[in-house]
Image (cartoon, grey):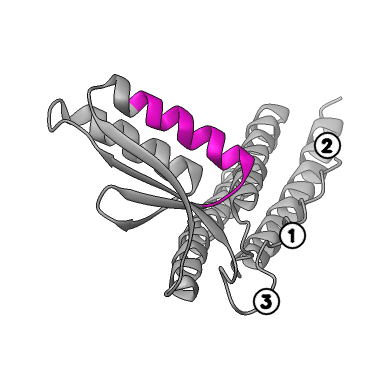
C-alpha cells in the first residue's frame, strides 16, 4: 500500500523566527449581527473559525493579510450586511502587541494541531480494535484508509492557515507517520488473510 507524503508546512510570513507575527499586516473584520435569529451568529462564528481567524475581542476577528484571506473576509462581510448586520474590513499593523497577536494566532493553530493528534490516537485505537476483533477484510482496510485520508486533508487545511509557523505541526507529522505505519501493517495482514482464503 502506498501512502502519500505528509505535506511540508508553508513558509512562515514572520521574518523573525521565535517572534510570531513580527511585521505582519492584519486584516480585521469588525461586525455586528442582529441578535435574532441566533443561527446567524453561529454561522458567522463557524465561518470565521474555518478561516483560522482569531478574535481580538467580541466581533473583531483578525487574520494575517493575504489576497486569499481578503477575498474570504470580503465575502463574509457581504453576507453579514445581507443578513441585516454591519461589517467593516480593515487592513492594519499592530503598533503595540504584535507579538501577543501572533502568539494568539499560533496558539489557535496549535489547538487545531492538538485536535488532529487526538484523532490520530483514535485512529490507532480503531485499527487496534480490528486486530482484537480479528477483522482483516478489504472493506475494513478501505474504511481505515479513508479515515487516514481525512486526517491528512485536515492537516493540510490547518497547515494552509498556519502562515506564522506554529510549533504543533511536527507532532501531527509524527502522529500521521505512526498512523500510516500502523495502516501499512494492517494492510499486510489483510493481504495475507485474504490470500489464505483462496
- Could you give the CA–CA distance between mark 1 and mark 3, rounded to whole angstroms? 12 Å
- Which is nearer the eye, 158 or 54? 54
Give the overall secondary structure of the magenta segment.
helix
Q: Quadrant of the N terminus?
A: top right
Q: Is residue 25 left or right of residue 77?
A: right
Name the outermost residue toward the top: 82
Query: Is 197 placed above or below 59 here?
Result: above
Residue at 69% x, 37% y is: 145
Q: Secondary structure at mark 3?
A: loop
Q: Secondary structure at mark 1?
A: loop
Reading the chain from its start, which is encountered first: label 2 or label 3?
A: 3
Query: Residue 191, which numbered label?
Result: 2
Reading the chain from its start, which is encountered first: label 2 or label 1?
A: 1
- Could you give the CA–CA distance between mark 2 and mark 1, rounded to whole angstroms? 40 Å
The total number of labels drawn is 3
Where residue 150 sits: x, y (%)? 61, 38
Q: Which residue is mark 3?
A: 16
Residue at 69% x, 30% y is: 142
Q: Which residues are magenta?
A: 64-79
- Which is nearer the eye, 115 or 7? 7
Residue at 67% x, 27% y is: 139
Name the outermost residue toward the bottom: 18
Where residue 12 sits: x, y (%)? 69, 62
Amino acid at each position: 500500500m502506498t501512502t502519500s507524503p505528509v505535506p511540508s508546512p508553508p513558509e512562515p510570513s514572520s521574518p523573525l523566527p521565535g517572534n510570531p507575527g513580527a511585521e505582519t499586516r492584519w486584516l480585521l473584520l469588525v461586525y455586528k449581527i442582529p441578535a435574532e435569529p441566533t443561527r446567524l451568529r453561529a454561522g458567522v462564528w463557524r465561518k470565521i473559525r474555518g478561516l483560522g481567524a482569531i478574535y481580538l475581542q467580541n466581533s473583531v476577528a483578525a487574520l494575517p493579510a493575504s489576497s486569499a484571506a481578503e477575498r474570504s473576509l470580503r465575502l463574509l462581510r457581504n453576507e453579514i450586511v445581507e443578513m441585516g448586520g454591519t461589517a467593516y474590513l480593515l487592513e492594519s499593523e499592530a503598533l503595540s502587541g504584535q507579538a501577543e497577536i501572533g502568539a494568539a494566532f499560533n496558539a489557535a493553530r496549535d489547538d487545531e494541531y492538538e485536535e488532529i493528534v487526538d484523532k490520530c490516537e483514535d485512529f490507532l485505537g480503531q485499527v487496534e480494535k480490528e486486530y482484537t476483533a480479528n477483522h482483516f477484510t478489504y472493506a475494513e482496510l478501505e474504511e481505515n484508509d479513508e479515515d487516514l485520508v481525512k486526517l491528512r486533508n485536515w492537516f493540510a487545511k490547518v497547515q494552509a492557515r498556519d502562515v506564522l509557523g506554529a510549533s504543533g505541526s511536527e507532532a501531527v507529522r509524527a502522529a500521521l507517520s505512526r498512523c500510516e505505519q500502523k495502516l501499512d501493517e494492517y494492510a499486510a495482514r489483510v493481504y495475507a488473510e485474504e490470500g489464505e482464503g483462496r
